[in-house]
Image (cartoon, helix red, strand yellow):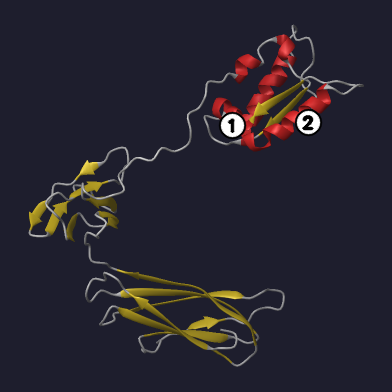
Amino acid sequence: MRFTRSRSFAFTLAGREEGSEVWIRTTFGASLGTAGTLAVEVNGEADPSPARIAAAPSHTYGTITTATRTATPAADNLSVQLKLTTTGTVAAARVDAIDINYTRTLAMPASGILDFTLSGPEARISGAGPDTRVWDVTDPLAITEMELRRSGADATWRSPYGGGRRYVAWNPAATGFTPVASGAPIAAQNLHGALSEPDALPDMVIVAPALYREQATRIAAMHRSDPDEPLTVAVADADQIYNEFGSGAPDVNAIRRFLKMVYDRGQLPAAPCASPSF
């Protein structure tokens, strides 16, 4: 909006509850030579209190301004027009985001699955079939099925809990319930045992992910065959270290614990060599 001081954006308020209020928040970044204002007009209705935009200091790129207002449009079409007003120079003027919130009618979609959050204990959902089920999934470890009272295509229920609750309404015939396997089976491994013998302690430890395993092995072979100072080198797979020393989480502390184990074993009296130097 540096060269165009006014710009309009059109939105469709799908599924809006009739007569419900719409909340609009605009985040705007600008670098102005003198202070200005940002007006947010909704469906041609003037902004009663435009947001003030401070002049940007010379040592900054600009300022961020947030403008909010509410409206109750008669239809489900929303036109938001932003108007920038200033008497000075405009080095930059950009719309970062326009957030729109409104109350939607609770209705089953064609997909047969609906995930939603409610704040009150009583609720009604339209478009429910005879097999539609509603689960309270606020606590994934204690999912509760709601007891529905059906009236035609509507279903109502009352939650015994207060506060915000998260629900899933679904039809058994809906798609999307096929389990999808994630990851791959973990093969048996034993890094603790592989380095349990004193003569298995390396001079150098190389930790590498599977992607760089081949290159790490080449580096290890180069040090093992060094004519002047051959080293005993162990190449450890990063994923195996995460599995055995980090409960499967890719945490750098798992590598630290693995190297600490190798170091401590090099300090034992029976160790033929000192702890790894590299």
Counting residues from the N terminus, which is met first, the one under dot 2 or under dot 1?
2
- Report the quarter where the C terminus lies: top right
Task: Using the rendered image of the protein, determine whether residue 83 is visible from the camera's viewpoint.
Answer: no
Q: Secondary structure at mark 1?
A: helix
In the image: residue 37, left or right of residue 160: right
Task: Tell me if residue 83 comes above or below residue 202 in the rendering.
Answer: below
Residue at the (21%, 62%) spot, across then down = 107
**Numbered badge on residue 174:** none
In the image: residue 206, left or right of residue 48: right
Task: Tell me if residue 155 comes above or below residue 83 in the rendering.
Answer: above
Q: Which residue has dot 1 on it?
A: 239
Tell me residue 79's x, y (percent): 38, 83
Mark 2: few, some, or many residues within 10 Å (few <14, many ≥20)? some
Tell me residue 221's x, y (percent): 79, 25
Q: Tell which residue pokes out farthest to the right in this image.
A: 228
Viewer-nearest of discs 2 and 1: 2
* CA separation in Å, label 2 and label 1: 19 Å
Q: Quadrant of residue 268?
A: top right
Q: Secondary structure at mark 2?
A: helix
Q: Quadrant of residue 213?
A: top right
- Report the quarter where the N terminus lies: bottom right
Q: Which residue has dot 2 on it?
A: 219
Give, as a three-letter code, the residue at label 2. Ile
Give, as a three-letter code, the residue at label 1. Asp
Tell me residue 266's x, y (percent): 74, 15
Tell me residue 69's x, y (percent): 39, 78
Q: Quadrant of residue 253?
A: top right
